[in-house]
């Protein structure tokens, strides 16, 4: 079967769920972008999905060129520190350095360091002759997907589940073993 390119995907036409001014960060229909013009509530308008844009920056933190950035829809600012919860959404990377007192920063939309989803944090859980192990990771990671890797001498052992609740990651094994389990918390909410 042949494919046909519909668009380069640099912008998207939306029917606005709120009023947006040109330059506002817009989260809608699973996309995040920047309004290219003023868009009235209920009207059709275009949001940029790529490119470099000046966005409102969270003060009190310095950015280094290339930092991963998240948009906090509750504060309506961009931050280089993932806080967690439904308000934070990966938006792109810092195009240039920004000082901690700066109220705006240059954001290159949609840039990641791989074709994979962003890894927010990683670590290790030691399980000693037990069926599960826990580690505190912080409440900001509740409800996110966890990817695991395990090292054990028991070829029949595997990770049954890994879940975060109340800021604690619990890794459950299929049996009772001694193992080291490495984890990565991904920027994807559990469906």
Image (cartoon, rainbow, N blue to C red):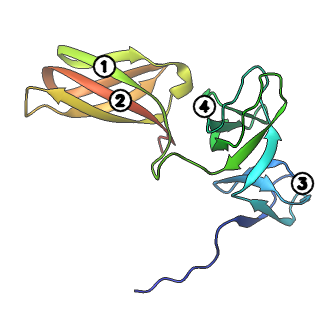
The label shown at residue 85 is 4
Verify CB contact (< 8 Å) between mark 4 and mark 2. no
Q: Residue furthest bottom?
A: 2
Q: Are marks 4 and 1 in contact (CB under 8 Å)?
A: no
**Pointer 2: what residue?**
183
| Res 125 label | 1
Mark 3 sits on what residue?
22
Q: Residue at x 59, y 29 (%)?
A: 84
C-alpha distance separating marks 4 and 2: 19 Å
Check the image and report above or below for 50 versus 169.
Answer: below
Query: For residue 152, what is the image quadrant?
Result: top left
Depicted 109 relative to depicted 106: above or below? below
Residue beneath the point at 60% across and 31% down: 85
Query: Measured along the vertical axis of the image, is residue 187 above or below residue 177?
Result: below
Labels 3 and 2: the sequence-earlier one: 3
Please give the name of the residue rendered at 22% of the width and 17% of the height, measured from the top-left corner.
127
């Amino acid at each position: 079967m042949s494919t046909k390119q519909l668009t380069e995907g640099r912008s998207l036409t939306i029917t606005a769920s709120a009023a947006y001014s040109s330059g506002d960060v817009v989260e809608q229909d699973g996309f995040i972008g920047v309004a290219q013009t003023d868009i009235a509530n209920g009207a059709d308008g275009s949001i940029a999905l790529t490119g470099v844009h000046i966005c409102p920056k969270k003060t009190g933190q310095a950015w280094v060129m290339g930092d991963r950035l998240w948009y906090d829809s509750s504060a309506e600012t961009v931050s280089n520190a993932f806080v967690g919860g439904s308000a934070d959404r990966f938006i792109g990377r810092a195009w240039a350095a920004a000082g901690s007192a700066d109220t705006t920063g240059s954001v290159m939309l949609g840039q990641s360091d791989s074709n994979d989803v962003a890894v927010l944090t990683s670590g290790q859980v030691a399980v000693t002759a037990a069926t599960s192990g826990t580690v505190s990771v912080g409440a900001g990671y509740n409800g996110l997907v966890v990817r695991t890797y395990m090292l054990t001498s028991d070829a029949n052992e595997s990770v049954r589940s890994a879940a975060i609740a109340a800021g604690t990651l619990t890794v459950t094994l299929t049996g009772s073993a001694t193992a080291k389990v490495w984890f990565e918390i991904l920027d994807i909410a559990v469906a």
